[in-house]
Amino acid sequence: MTFKPENITHHIYYMQHIAISLRPFIGSKDFNISRSFYRDLGFEEIIIDSNMSLFKINEFGFYLQNAYVKDWIDNTMLFLEVDDVQRYWAELSALALPEKYEGVRLSSIVHNDWGSECFLHDPSGVLWHFGKFKK
């Protein structure tokens, strides 16, 4: 039989997602320092094993691994939507994380067409965006 594009039957199937959570995996340069950083940031730590922990705030979470690949870490970004960027930035500032952890940087709030956000680099270089969308 000769392949002909007109012989292809397209079937559309819509998955019925009942999503429970989305949990990215991030790495760490120094696992124990990163664990301490995320606890200080207000995340609850659930130890999975000696090389991985789940960090949660409410129903949102991510897995922190005892694994470091510079290119991966340098290109990892996470966005956490918050209800009030100004208050969140003030709370982040009060934690004084850049003074406590080497490599941590907190930026000022940036106002964009879509909303506002501030940025925080963790001790390994993972870039967090804390933002709120305009309605």
Image (tube, rainbow, N blue to C red):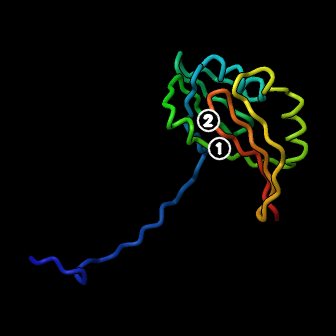
Labels 1 & 2 near each other (Cβ < 8 A): yes
- The vertical placement of 73 against 98, above or below, is below
Residue depicted at 53% across the width and 15% down the height: 50
Image position, residue 42 (x, y; %): 78, 29
Classify mark 1: helix, strand or loop: strand
Image position, residue 52 (x, y; %): 55, 23
- The vertical placement of 90 against 131, above or below, is above
Image position, residue 61 (x, y; %): 65, 36
Classify mark 2: helix, strand or loop: strand
Image position, residue 19 (x, y; %): 58, 50
- The amino acid marked with disc number 1 is Leu
- The amino acid marked with disc number 2 is Phe
In front: mark 1 or mark 2? 1
Q: Quadrant of residue 112?
A: bottom right
Residue bearing the label numbered 1:
78
Residue depicted at 84% across the width and 34% down the height: 92
